[in-house]
Amino acid sequence: MISSEPIISVGLIERAREIRGTFNGPFELPSSITVSGPFRMRSESGRVVLYDSGGVEVHRSDELRCRPLDCATFTLSDVTIGINFHWERKENQIFEGDLRIRSNDDGSLIVINEVRLERYLQSVISSEMNAEAPIELLKAHAITSRSWLVAMLERQEQFRRGATQSPPLHVAADEVVRWYDREDHRTFDVCADDHCQRYQGVTKIFSKTVTEAIEVTRGVFLVSGNAICDARYSKACGGRTELFENCWEEKPHPYLQSVSDSTEEAPPLVNEEDAERWIGSSPDVYCNTTDGNIVRQILPSFDRETTDFFRWKVEYSREQMEEILTAKSGIDFGAVQDIVPIKRGTSGRIVKLKITGTKRTMIVGKELEIRRWLSKTHLYSSAFSVNIQRDPEGLPKNFVFLGAGWGHGVGLCQIGAAVMATKGYTAEEILKHYFLRADIRKLYEG
């Protein structure tokens, strides 16, 4: 296992034709040139070209690395956050550490930030949660985020050494099963968006509470046996967390079991009737909160725009459903006749879904692919019931999805953990609730 703090490479922007920003202080280029102020970068003939604010070429190379001097930072303009999700938008963001730019074969650019792990985590915690959230929540989240990241890096190293991994995509004539993980990235460790962990540089940090949470948990990890836990988290589980293998690789983890998000154990959802009843109910669980003060305290401003995270409803006409399915799946189903859950996880999340049309019938999985196919962005989760309103001839008129939770539901429930913290639970108690049979261990100091 890890014994010292690593440097993390974070993908900030991919496939951009042009990058604009500002060096907020002196940065050194490979040619020993020192630059500062506004800049523009383009890919020309497979090389990265840097221009100053006046349009004068400053540097040209296959890959450009800009190193900060005197604690300088850099600003990037129009960074997209929430990519393909319902809160997608652009922001100007400020970053510490090295700036690396690579050119793709198609003439686009990749922008990478290299930063030390603990500094990276300060931004992650402030980006994922409100920086003024209870410190026990921030401590629990710091340990969870740190564990997930380093477990992923160690797993990648095993793959490079020849370890095998289940393929993330299965395609047959009548079935598409796909899961998404960090392994989609090849040129950097993690991306800066919800696909991995939100990372928005120093734009939103640093409060004293976040700084304290990082400092007191420095080098602390969730550990199972002799390995760091692949500690997942999502925004709101909806009342019960999900099994790892129902969302990603078919490889159970003892610490990523399905647990009730309360002090009372609720039975796992094993059939369609139980799932529909659960989704249509309002159980007394941690993440079922309507307390505006708690929500404002724990969620960043753009997450607070989503108010129906615990139970939600989405409705489409048949024509709208067909248009979305064709656009998102690339499959022409014809007139959609039926949408039926085939397999659910213990939290009620659908793992496999059958879509029947006049031209094509397909089964789709896993949870994120289902969410992607059934929305112009993504459904909040795959824990939903399907209600079809039909005309007198039995043909579908409208598809109504009644859903529970926000995200995959595996591991720590962010809103549930936040409510636990406001009730006086410690970080250790929060982690022990969501990660069964995991130990908490300090693996490095400096």
Image (cartoon, rainbow, N blue to C red):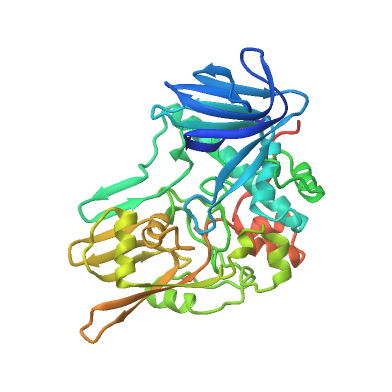
Q: Residue furthest front?
A: 54
From what the image shows, is residue 403 above or below residue 159?
below
Find residue 394 and report its image quarter. Answer: bottom left
Tell me residue 245's x, y (percent).
Answer: 43, 53
Residue 232 visible in the snapshot: yes
In the image, 254 versus 371, the foreground residue is 371
In the image, 137 versus 266, the foreground residue is 137
The answer to whether residue 66 is left or right of residue 294 is: left
In the image, 132 versus 376, the foreground residue is 376
From what the image shows, is residue 370 above or below residue 144?
below
Q: Quadrant of the N terminus?
A: top right
Q: Residue furthest top?
A: 31
Tell me residue 61's x, y (percent).
Answer: 52, 17
Tell me residue 145's x, y (percent).
Answer: 62, 46
Q: Residue at x 33, y 68 (%)?
A: 320
Q: Residue at x 25, y 55 (%)?
A: 331
Tell me residue 202's x, y (percent).
Answer: 71, 41
The answer to whether residue 19 is left or right of residue 218 is: left
In the image, 317 versus 278, the foreground residue is 317
From what the image shows, is residue 9 above or below residue 426?
above
Residue 188 visible in the snapshot: no
Q: Residue at x 65, y 49 (%)?
A: 127
Q: Residue furthest right?
A: 208
From what the image shows, is residue 233 above or below residue 335?
above
